[in-house]
């Protein structure tokens, strides 16, 4: 059967690309090996889908080409997607840092995208393995169908239990596109025996500023039985390279707070002073790490300043991350060097496109990666329709 475009992957990017092209008159086939569309959407945001972020801007994304995302993001912004959400009557709310969630369920976003596909006459085939992809005479042949245009929207290998694979990279290489080495992003760190003290306080979280190199994020850190997690950690994990230390500032103005505690309660110990600002179990672990056993009244300024330095830059040396199994997204992917930033089309292969997580564009935590899916999907969908004409 013949179509104007075949889109591989019924995730967020693939669904909106299909709907966009279909709405403009293109005959589109959307294929996915999964038995349901939008699986990652359904589990996102605790089941309520953090579908975009009001603060979306190109600087919130990682890529070997930091300018690549600008075009797509500006031509289909967070405000455009929000308008679509509201047009479908989906009630939403803003959480911290510009994050937008459905009041109801993530199922509403999937239903919205499927309705948009229905309106555009998109044919959706699920539980359909891609198999071999043929390419001859300017046409792509996939799963018994053919089209002059093919879109790679199969995502990356993060969360393999949801059916995620590295198929996008296999297809890209098949057509001569370079792939930036994929790695887990927005992922917890694992710690070794040297940091066992903090692994024993599993479940404790606190506000912090997490830092890797020159990159820092101020959000919560969660101590786990394996290492470190929480929003601040997930954010910096995207910038981390093996061997790099990770530091946490767990107490703002630590020096001032410790000196004030010494003045107010000279007979107290460090643990008590820390417990005024931090969870008790964390205060105990930090006091043990710092190692001041005397009453605060007997602690000199220099020693308090040393303690403050530790609290301001509590340093860990992760043994690694929890890998693709726990990574929310994949960093790296199909190199942007071979793609048009306006259309997401491969420069060297007419009719081939790559969108969403499959591409070397990775957003911060908080709805940014969904916005990239929407923006890149619309860019490709518009280009498909224009090329058809």
Image (spheres, rainbow, N blue to C red):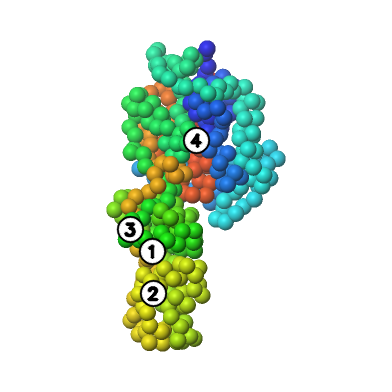
Instruction: From the image, tell me which residue sits under label 1.
Output: 197
Query: Residue extending furthest right?
Result: 89
Label 2 sits on a secondary structure element that is: helix
Q: Is residue 191 above or below residue 8?
A: below
Instruction: Please state the horizontal and vertical placement of residue 366, each as a whole percent of the image.
Output: 52, 49
Residue at 38% x, 71% y is 288
Q: Which mark is residue 23?
A: none
Q: Is residue 189 above or below residue 120?
A: below
Instruction: Please state the horizontal and vertical placement of residue 375, each as a whole percent of the image.
Output: 52, 38
Quadrant of res 360: top left
CB under 8 Å between discs 3 and 1: no
Q: Which mark is residue 162?
A: 4
Instruction: From the image, tell me which residue sits under label 2.
Output: 308
Residue at 34% x, 27% y is 173
Q: For the residues marked 1 and 2, what is the alpha-carbon distance in whole angstroms?
A: 19 Å
User: Of circles 1 and 2, which is in front?
Assistant: 1
Q: Earlier in the sequence, mark 3 or mark 4?
A: 4
User: Of circles 3 and 2, which is in front?
Assistant: 3
Instruction: From the image, tell me which residue sits under label 3.
Output: 193
CB under 8 Å between discs 4 and 2: no
Residue at 65% x, 38% y is 108
379 horizontally vs 310: left or right: right
Label 1 sits on a secondary structure element that is: helix
CB under 8 Å between discs 1 and 2: no
Q: Earlier in the sequence, mark 1 or mark 4?
A: 4
User: Of circles 3 and 4, which is in front?
Assistant: 3
Q: Pick the residue in front: 168 or 359.
A: 168
């Amino acid at each position: 059967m013949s179509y104007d475009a075949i889109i591989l992957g019924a995730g967020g990017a693939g669904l909106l690309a299909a709907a966009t092209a279909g709405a403009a008159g293109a005959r589109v086939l959307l294929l996915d090996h999964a038995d349901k569309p939008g699986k990652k959407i359904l589990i996102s945001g605790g089941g309520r889908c953090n579908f975009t972020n009001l603060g979306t801007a190109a600087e919130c994304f990682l890529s070997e080409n930091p300018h690549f995302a600008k075009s797509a993001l500006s031509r289909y912004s967070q405000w455009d997607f929000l308008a679509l959400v509201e047009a479908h009557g989906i009630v939403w709310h803003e959480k911290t840092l510009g994050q937008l969630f459905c009041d109801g369920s993530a199922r509403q976003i999937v239903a919205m995208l499927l309705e948009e596909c229905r309106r555009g006459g998109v044919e959706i085939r699920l539980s359909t393995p891609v198999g071999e992809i043929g390419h001859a005479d300017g046409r792509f042949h996939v799963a018994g169908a053919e089209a002059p245009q093919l879109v790679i929207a199969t995502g990356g290998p993060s969360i393999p239990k949801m059916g995620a694979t590295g198929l996008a990279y296999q297809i890209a290489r098949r057509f001569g596109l370079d792939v930036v080495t994929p790695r887990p992003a927005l992922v917890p760190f694992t710690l070794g025996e040297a940091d066992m003290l903090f692994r024993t306080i599993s479940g404790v979280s606190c506000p912090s500023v997490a830092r890797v190199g020159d990159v820092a994020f101020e959000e919560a850190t969660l101590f786990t039985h394996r290492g470190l997690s929480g929003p601040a950690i997930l954010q910096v994990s995207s910038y981390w390279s093996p061997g790099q230390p990770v530091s946490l500032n767990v107490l703002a103005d630590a020096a001032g707070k410790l000196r004030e505690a010494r003045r107010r309660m000279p007979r107290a110990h460090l643990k008590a002073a820390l417990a005024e600002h931090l969870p008790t179990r964390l205060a105990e672990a930090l006091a043990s790490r710092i190692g001041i056993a005397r009453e605060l009244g007997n602690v000199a300024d220099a020693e308090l300043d040393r303690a403050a330095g530790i609290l301001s830059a509590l340093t860990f040396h992760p043994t690694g991350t929890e890998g693709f199994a726990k990574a929310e997204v994949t960093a790296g992917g199909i190199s942007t060097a071979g793609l048009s930033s306006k259309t997401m089309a491969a420069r060297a292969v007419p009719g081939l496109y790559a969108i969403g997580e499959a591409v070397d564009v990775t957003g911060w935590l908080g709805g940014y990666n969904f916005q990239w899916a929407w923006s890149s999907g619309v860019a490709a969908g518009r280009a498909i329709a224009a090329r058809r004409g």
